[in-house]
Amino acid sequence: MSKQLTTEALERIYDQLAEVVDKAGPEKEALLLSKLCLLLAQQLGDEETIRECIDIAARDLS
Amino acid sequence: MTRPASRNSSLYFDYPHYPFVRPPELDGETIRHPVIIVGAGPVGVTAALELARHGIRSVVLDDKDSVNDGSRAICIARHSFEILQQLGLSDRFVNKALGWTHGTSYYRMQPVFRLEMPHSEDERFYPMYNIQQQFIEQFLIDKAMEEALIELRWQSRLEHIELHEDCAILTIDTPEGDYKTESEYVIAADGARSAVRKSLGLKLRGDAYEGKYVIVDIQMQSDYPTERRAFFDPPANPGSTVLVHKQPDNIWRVDYQLQDGEDEETALQEDNIRKRVGAIVDMIGEPGPWELEWWSLYKAYTLALDDYRHERVFFTGDAAHLVPIFGVRGLNSGFADAANIGWKLAYALKGNAPDALLDSYSPERRGATMEIFDNATKSTRFMTPPTRGYALMREAALSLSISQQFSRPLINPRQSQPYTYVDSPLTAFPERNAEFDSGPGAGSPLVNRRIGEDDYLLDHLGHGFSGLYFNKSGALPDDLDDLFSKLDTDSEPFTPIIISTVQLNRDDLTVLQDREERIFDFYGADDGTFYLVRPDRHITARWRGIQPDEVLQAFKQALGEQSS
């Protein structure tokens, strides 16, 4: 993960995600977030990093 | 506020009783006071003390006969201590309050964020102190009672306020009947349900937040150090949040968020409070025993008046603005309100400044509220997520932060910071300010520096305007004394502070030795650098190399005599 976001940018993204999740509604939020992950993966274009991120996200779920 | 059914007094605090004293107005005298302050809470009494510091008499009215029952504010920030120091009160607060510098946030009991507040040996005060509001009020009132210029009138409830061109007429209800009294100016410091605000038909505007917290004080012996602990989704309150703060006299503040769909009335029953608090005490590993002091229900708001000045009336503290508790900005911004309006009213009443100076109160302090709202809205959204989307994002940030560094700033509680009056009409010469690479900028409060044993920069400030002049050459410019004398007003002398790297033979001036250039470096100073400082420690303007004509111009602007 090379490029770093500023805290301010991270906060703006946090808020936008919260709002778009609310708009999608509970039944469609998982679909929305999964689509977003695929899009970001395509943009990032680095399979190794993407797989690493998937592993990190899968941690501490319970 | 509710106490346990078995007890109707505090476990540790003796509430003082302040008697009603019959004022001359009840016997038909007509008096016009320079300032009447409505509300003897911490903000009102601080305003009275600030006025007295500048030689202005005031009357403080309060409908109660004691200090506030139950605790309200508990966190006082460093910049508030610097205000208390100027009132000659900080020693008593330092001796009682618990200073702290850091905090920890946990997600399901795993640490995910470490809050470190800026602190160093250059500071006289800790970044934050915990102390119950009733002690805060008592210390302030004790000081006010020693002060000949302050008259405290207890059991005196404001019924009505009427504004005239040259004064306000207040109708006061007392145990011995009503009376009318006149005042040139009024400071409304009468809290969230301000009677002054109601009487003038003014309304707070803003937002209310979803989440509800139960706030409980308990007495419990524990050696755990003073810090802020926040527990997200802990086993003792699944899905919700718990905050724990230590206070003096073995009192602990426990705030816990009601869970989704939890019934308010049921949650506030004493046996349910005991069950929840017991689980939290177990969770933090305390063996007990503990006893309940009181509890209450809290909801977050961001509400403010459109204008903090209404003709001859100035609104301060909760009467002007309600802010969420997360980030401890309520009382701390109230102290700053009191310090701000205090010196301005004093200068106007003594004829040292025009009415325009008083107009600067609202932009400066309402500006501070708006910045607080911006920060508080974010921290409140985190503490009480308003929707499913925010709740989900918060869980994601917390869960990631167990292993990842980058998401931890999202958990930052954004504690209270002093506000910068950079856009104020009183702040001058932004182009001179831009010549500096470091140091506090124009509009900011001065930052303390250690001079020696029990000796700090801010200890040397005067009652009126002060100035920091930096010297390296060992010789002061010829026109400096002349400039300093022009910065005196009839009743408020100017206080020059010379910071010098070399010996200076000027016994008539305060000279602080800075051989290692520590203050020089911090303030980005050169030989001849000058900072002009208001009575409330905020910087009016600063020059890398002093320009006497501009200093005089900035001084006039800081007194509202001309606008930029």
Image (spheres, rainbow, N blue to C red):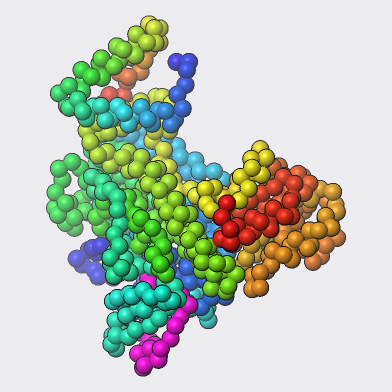
Q: Can residue B365 be seen by looking at this rendering? A: yes
- Closer to us: B289 or B403: B403
Assign the N terminus of chain B to one quadrant of the image.
bottom left
The structure residue drawn at horizontal position 29% and vertical position 76%, both measured from the top left corner, is B160
Q: Nearer the viewer, residue B267 or B197?
A: B197
Can residue B31 be found in the magenta stretch? yes
Residue at the location (40% across, 28% down)?
Answer: A10
Q: Residue furthest bottom?
A: B27
Closest to the observer, B504 or B93: B504
Residue B551: x, y in percent? 69, 55
Q: Is residue B142 visible?
A: no
Residue B118 % position (x, y): 54, 43
What range is drawn magenta here? B20-42
Choose between B292 and B153: the one closer to the eye: B153
| B4 relative position to B118: left or right | left
Image x and y of residue B481, in percent: 79, 62
Would residue B169 be found to the left or right of residue B348 on screen? Answer: left
Q: Is residue B186 above or below residue B366?
A: below
Taking B521 as reference, is B308 left or right? left
At 21% from the left edge and 28% from the top edge, which residue is drawn? A23
Instruction: Say which residue appears at 46% left-offset and 27% top-offset.
Output: A6
